[in-house]
Image (cartoon, helix red, strand yellow):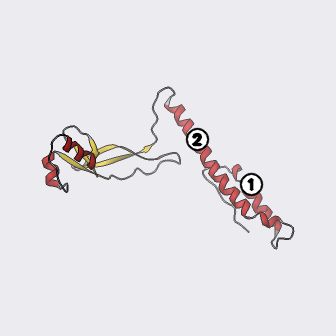
């Protein structure tokens, strides 16, 4: 649980708040009730909703706290957030996207390679399967990096 100190706006975990009270000769308590929180000048910070939507590159990230209808909640936004520094925010975002694309492409290729390895046996001359169908399936797997949506939107071929 997190606590927000009204006077300063500082937010900390309850264990940190207890340590803060102890270090400053403040009162101790067993359970933080609404009455105790009121007497100590603090508010309990409730868990707010995660940010949703966005793109393949975005995720929900914490961005402080916010007051809604008199109660305090953790605030989440879609991230990551880029700011101008040694490189521009646009350059940082482009580098981030390139890294995420490369990670996703690697993940897809690992899955593709596993699928290929699992059906290597179908290409043996004495395999009791239609080797032409399996060869076409294997070629479709090898062609996955050529798909228009690669690496994020993949249409996996159906195994014969």
The spot of residue 125 in percent (x, y) is: 87, 67
Measured in 3D between alpha carbons, the distance from the residue under mark 2 to the one under mark 1, in whole angstroms, is: 22 Å
The spot of residue 34 in percent (x, y) is: 17, 54
- 71 or 55, which lies in front? 71
x 79%, y 67%: residue: 122
- Indicate which disc, 2 or 1, sits on the residue closer to the N terminus: 2
- Dot 2 crowding, Cα within 10 Å, few <14, some 14–19, many 20+: few
Taking the view exactly as shown, the residue that stands out farthest to the bottom is 128
- Tell me if 21 is positioned left or right of 63 in this view: left
| Quarter where residue 119 is shown | bottom right
- Tell me if 71 is positioned left or right of 97 in this view: left
Q: Is residue 139 above or below residue 125?
A: above
Q: Which residue is mark 1?
A: 142
The spot of residue 142 in percent (x, y) is: 74, 54
Q: Which residue is mark 2?
A: 99
In the picture, the quarter occupied by the C terminus is bottom right
- 42 or 136, which lies in front? 42
x 77%, y 57%: residue: 139
Identify the secondary structure beneath mark 2: helix
Residue 20: give its label: none
């Amino acid at each position: 649980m997190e606590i927000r100190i009204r006077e300063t706006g500082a937010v900390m975990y309850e264990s940190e708040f207890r340590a803060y009270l102890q270090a400053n000769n403040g009162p101790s308590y067993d359970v933080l009730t609404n009455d105790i929180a009121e007497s100590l000048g603090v508010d309990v910070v409730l868990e707010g909703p995660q940010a949703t939507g966005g793109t393949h590159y975005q995720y929900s990230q914490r961005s402080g706290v916010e007051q809604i209808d008199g109660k305090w909640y953790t605030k989440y936004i879609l991230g990551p957030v880029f700011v101008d520094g040694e490189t521009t925010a646009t350059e940082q975002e482009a580098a981030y996207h390139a890294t995420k694309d490369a990670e996703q492409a690697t993940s897809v290729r690992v899955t593709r390679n596993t699928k290929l390895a699992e059906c290597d046996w179908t290409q043996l001359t004495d395999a009791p399967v239609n080797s032409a169908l399996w060869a076409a399936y294997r070629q479709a797997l090898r062609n996955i990096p050529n798909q228009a949506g690669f690496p994020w939107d993949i249409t996996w071929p159906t195994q014969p």
